[in-house]
Amino acid sequence: MKRALTMSAAVVAVCASWAPMAQAASTLVIESWRADDLAIWQDKIIPAFEKAHPDIKVTFAPTAPKEYNAALNAKLESGTAGDIVTCRPFDASLEQFTKGRLAPLNDLPGMNNFSAAAKLAWSTDDGKTTFCVPMASVLHGFIYNKEAFDKLGLKEPKTEDELFAALDKIKKDGTYVPMAMGTADQWEAATTGYQNIGPNYWKGEEGRNAVIQGSQKLSEGGWVETLRTLAKWAPYLGDGYKAQSYADSQNIFTLGRAAIYPGGSWEISGFNAQATFKMGAFPPPVRKVGDTCYISDHPDIAVGMNTKTKNPEAAKKFLTWVTTSDFAKIYANALPGFFSLQTAPVAVDDPLAQTFVGWRNGCKSTIRSTYQILSRGAKPNLEDATWGASANVINGTETPEKAAERLQAALANWYKPQQK
Amino acid sequence: MRLYRAAFTRGPALFKDHRFLTTKGYAVATSAQRKPIRWHIGVLLAPAILIYTVIMLLPVFDSLRMSLYGKGPDGAPVFVGLANYTTLLTDSYWQGPFWNALWNNVVFFIIHMLVQNPIGILLAALLSLGKLPGREFYRTALFLPTMLSFVIVGFVWKLILSPAWGVSKTLLGSVGLGSWFAPWLGQPDTALITLALISVWQFIGLPMMLIYAAMIAIPDELMEAASCDGVTGINQFFKIKLPLIWPSIGVVSILTFVGNFNAFDLIYVSQGALAGPNFSTDILGTLLYRTFFGNQLQAGDPFMGATIAGAMFLIILCGVCVYLYGVQRRLAYYQM
């Protein structure tokens, strides 16, 4: 009996001594879909922040990417979400903000480290309020097998004619599949095809804004030209590309079986780990010599603050730290291919990532055309329709003109400025 | 399985009448006394009814109720009656995908009925032959795929049929048929048939087992008597065994119907939520999923999703009713 008493006294004493310690440091929980980055957060980003702010403890709690939107929504609704929320670009986050679940961050110190374009994906439609701190964007382009290019005496194509000439040469030689892409998942055809080469056709932001304002149609000009060019890709894709998935394409390229991979900077970490040959990258070729080049520089990830957080001060400290170059340097180098959106340039060590980010100097940046505003319709949703249209024209089951008409109809069906 | 049992309890019609008589007799004899309340029936049934109600009936009715609501101007649900069903069947953006999915579902079902069930019957007939060496092995091997997860089946077949690394191209090439190979899962006119055949491969064990069970229940004396009367060989199957297993075939058909119109997993695993290429493999299950939960940039619409679920429920209900009242009553049951 006596022993039990001493034991419980000891337990009480230990608890009592722990309690004040636990209260002294505030704890922040980060919601994210980047489960792949868990190690980077735990080993690099969080220790760096905790070193600067010893009074704040940070936990990174990711969910699987497919479930993130639904899981986050449910957590925010029931009030169990973490203090810091990783923001998807555009409507998914805008909806949380309009429901009052994400705090406005206009007054956050350090927000002026970002240009209006960088903040676009996490601002209200009028651009007046920003509710997430932009972390990174991804660039579209073509990655190629340097060994294959050297062997066949090819140079990086600058114009579209040069690209097709190179593809012809690779096809004639027969050692390599000219281009690693499949249409089975549809996402590839739209994202690494249509959204990759399209900006050169619709002149980036100029065309995108014109569609938003209703002065251009998706069934005319550069918009349908993009689909016509995509249809010409079919003969250069590998045998059975119709049943080739995204993962198949990645593997075909990293195994050295294909010469060119239409994709984007988000592939860099994975390809560096998989491929045994040297890789290079070139931006989407322009249509004629001397044309301005446009690149899809797509905002992908940001962080915001849950309005119901119990530690708003600590959360703001964390978000302010994300606006600094300290964070940008760690993030951009831990994840080459995810480029900082801060106005001050951030040095990246990875050579392939350097190539990609270098295009920002010579080319004009734009974002994926379907992401802002235009994909709010449900029947059918423009993004989904674009996947289908891009895959169909490559498969040859729909003409570019018909596919473009269908996209325009999908948009005009609900979008007022396109109904004039 | 519920349906399976229901079909068999209908069998012994004679017993029913007999029981009816005894109950009546009992009632006459004891009408003066107060009948004791038979608590045990309720108590014993309660757990099953309770669990079934909570996890099956309530969600079904709540989903049906949800299909009668729509999103109001302020985002709150508003009662709209049957408007969602009208939209589904008449709106140009809903009816196309809906009829496409329904038609694909019908094709999916027809392929199962034409391929899976006849082969299932054949395998059962072979297994129930008197002397078949290695019968236990075949029985287990043929039933194994049925126990595999959809994810494994979808993934394995996608790999086998993959034009980049699949073995099917090499296998066809080794017998000189290399030119027959095509990216079957990527072509609009072959994708659905390919998936249906994969599903047949997976589920061939179910009709085989059910019909095998019915076949081994046929007494040997019956077959011996048939032999004495001069019915031998293949005639024994068509004249004696087949009439005796018709009820089982009926049960297998209705199980196939319900399973096929509820199908979703295999298509989702191998073709994704967009059921490509160009919606050629889109069935009601994938259409429901896409509508209810959304896809990529498309937000989910729980009300229209519930409407599609409601339509699926009605289609399956009608099919089962047609079977129960139109087919099952006409089947002849034999006492053995």
Image (spheres, coloured by chain):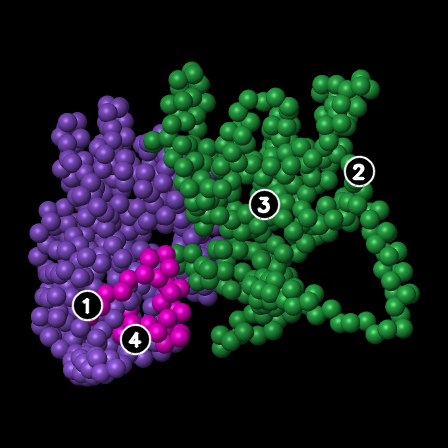
Mark 4 = which residue? A306
Q: Which chain is purple?
A: A
Query: Which colour represents chain B?
Result: green
Query: From this viewpoint, is residue A232 visible?
Result: no
Whichever of callouts 4 and 1 sits on the residue coming sooner in the sequence is 1
Looking at the rendered structure, whether the residues under marks 4 and 2 are on a common chain is answered as no
Q: Position of residue B166 (x, y in %)?
A: 37, 30
Mark 2 = which residue? B334
Whichever of callouts 2 and 3 sits on the residue coming sooner in the sequence is 3
Helix, strand or loop at label 3? It is helix
Check the residue under mark 1 and report the chain it is in: A
Q: Residue A58: which numbered mark, if any?
A: none
Helix, strand or loop at label 2? It is loop
Q: Position of residue A43 (x, y in %)?
A: 14, 60
Mark 1 = which residue? A115
Q: Is residue B35 above or below residue B106?
A: below
Check the residue under mark 2 and report the chain it is in: B
Mark 3 = which residue? B260
Nearest to viewer (mark 2 / mark 3): 2
Alpha-carbon distance for marks 2 and 3? 30 Å
Nearest to viewer (mark 3 / mark 4): 3
Which residue in the rendered view is the most extreme toward the top? B176
Depth check, front residue: A29 or B79: A29
